Image (cartoon, helix red, strand yellow):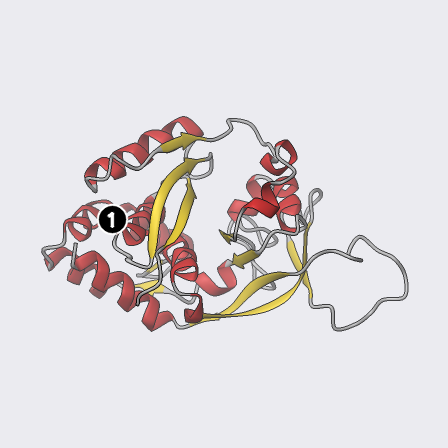
Amino acid sequence: MASEPKKIIIDTDPGIDDAMAIFLALRSPEVEVIGLTTIYGNVYTTLATRNALHLLEVAGRTDIPVAEGSHVTLTAIQQDPDFSKNIRQIVLLGGAFAVNGNVNPAAEANIFGDPDAADVVFTSGADVVAVGINVTHQVVLTAADREKLASSKGKFAQYLTKILDVYFSYHFEAYDTTGVYLHDPTALLAAVNPSLLTYIEGAVRVQTNGITRGLTILYNKQKRFGEVTEWSDKPSVKVAVTVDAPAVVKLLMDRLMDS
């Protein structure tokens, strides 16, 4: 007998690749989307909420509730200390883990947006899986893939084709590449099918100020240091290190074209 779908809440700031991830989640029988929460990032919180509601309308899923997140940087965990015990798992898109960031050489955008909150999440004791741009930069949707989406009958594929132009132009300008990175869809699929990625475990801390503000560092716990430090006794989290990129792209394409 097939196992019950995993109930998930998507915290999002849509965003083009967020839109892809949300549509992908709605087309994934392994998960049941029980709500969207919004936060500032690509756009301000109010617009993120409007975009999230719009995407659910396009999908014909206005039954899914949307809760608007904070307009200020805030660590929600601090408001509810039992949060980390009550939630089964947090799969987050964030961090660069030994590659250059995407807002500056040190930091990835989501972590840079609120490094203090990120550090609280990583050290909260929750079951955290971090999918960073060290992994998502390996997962590329090509111009040929976009043509395939455009020529398919899928409702979601058709909608995304219309908004992908701006995403392709951004990547061409910023990275001189003719494909786009699938950040959010990869993180979503880590929740849907964890076996598409491999992970290492260790303590993660975030630099909260200075030139490297937003830097994520993983301590693999292989060496026991003599002195007590800010790393001592911190809980381990999982950090993605490899991804089966062709499988991720294929899954995304199949599910969006069949929508």
Residue, x 48% and y 65% (percent of image)? 135
Q: Is residue 107 above or below residue 137?
A: above
Q: Position of residue 58 (x, y in %)?
A: 20, 39
Q: Amino acid at mark 1?
A: Asp
Most extreme residue toward the front is: 1
Question: In this image, 77 relative to 89: left or right?
Answer: right
Q: Residue 151 at what x, y percent from top left?
A: 10, 59
* Residue identifier under label 1: 165
Q: How many marks?
A: 1
Q: Is residue 240 above or below residue 46?
A: below
Q: Relative to 102, is 153 on the left or the right?
A: left
Q: Residues within 10 Å of mark 1 (few under 14, many from 20)?
A: few
User: What is the quadrant of the N terminus in the image?
Assistant: bottom left
Is residue 200 visible in this depiction of the protein?
Answer: yes
Quadrant showing the C terminus:
bottom left
Which residue is nearer to you in this view: 67 or 142?
67
| Numbered disc 1: secondary structure | helix
**Residue drawn where x is 55% and y is 27% of the image:** 72
Nearer to us in this view, 129 or 50: 129
Residue farthest toward the right in the current orientation of the protein = 227
Identify whether 169 is placed above or below 246. above
Q: Specify whether residue 143 is in view.
A: no
| Residue 219 x %, y % | 71, 64
The image quadrant of residue 81 is top right
Classify residue 227 by image quadrant: bottom right
Using the rendered view, name the quadrant where residue 77 is placed: top right
Look at 34% across and 66% down and name the residue there. Answer: 248
